[in-house]
Each structure stands twice: as C-alpha cells, then as structure tokens.
Image: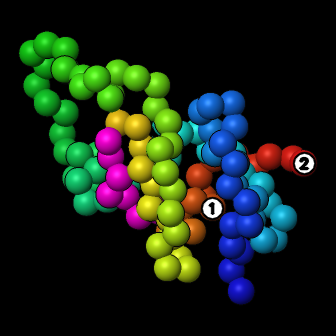
Amino acid sequence: MDPRPTKLERRDGSKLLIEWSDGERREISFGELRKACPCATCREKHGAPPEPSGGLPVLSAAEARPLTIEGMRPVGHYAYAIAFSDGHDSGIYTLELLRSLGEPVAE
C-alpha cells in the first residue's frame, strides 16, 4: 500500500508538515504549495508566455497579505483540496504530488 498522511501540522506560520505512514516527514512552504497548484487555471497560467512588460501587476488585498492555508480537506482517499488565503481553492493535490514537494525533515 502507498504511504498515506498520518498527521498534518502548520509550522512557523508559513509551512506545512506532513507525516506519512512509512515514517517520512516532509515540510512544504505555503508558497511552494501554492505554486504547485495542479488546477487547470494555474497549469495554463504557468505555461503561458509572460505578459508584455508595461508596468507593475496589480495585486488584490488577499494577494498582498502573507500567504496562509485557510483549510485543507481530503478528497476521496487519494488527494487533498487546499484553500489559500489569496482566495484560491480549486487545486486538488494528489498524495503523490504532496509527497514530491518540500524537504524531508528529521524527527
């Protein structure tokens, strides 16, 4: 059986610690999680050529605040949906994707 998360914990206000059933522990920054969003909109945005430079981008109030995780819920037995403080909540993060992100953490 593939490893499964056994514990999710916020750390330092900017990271998520995931403990897995095989004993591995991985710490992922909220920013890395947000950048890895697998939803269609984000995949399209990451693959799009950069906009011609004509000024600075305008940020919403939510985008200007430090990024946090507002909520996280399981999707079946294979993924988690994550809601971020910038209002984005359509990404479904498979367990395989979560396992590939971040850095291993010693106990």
Residue 13: image quadrant is top right
First in sequence, mark 2 or 1: give its number: 1
State the residue position of label 1: 99
Question: Toward the viewer: 12 or 102?
Answer: 12
Is 39 displayed left or right of 24 in the figure?
left
Circle 2: residue type: Glu
**Coloring scheme of the render?**
rainbow
Q: Position of residue 32 (x, y in %)?
A: 51, 41
Residue 86 versus residue 33 in the image, above or below: above
Q: Position of residue 17 (x, y in %)?
A: 70, 48
State the residue position of label 2: 107
Question: Toward the viewer: 101 or 82?
Answer: 82
* Residues shaded magenta: 87-93
CA separation, marks 2 and 1? 17 Å
For the point 24% across and 25% down, the residue is 60
Residue 29: image quadrant is top right
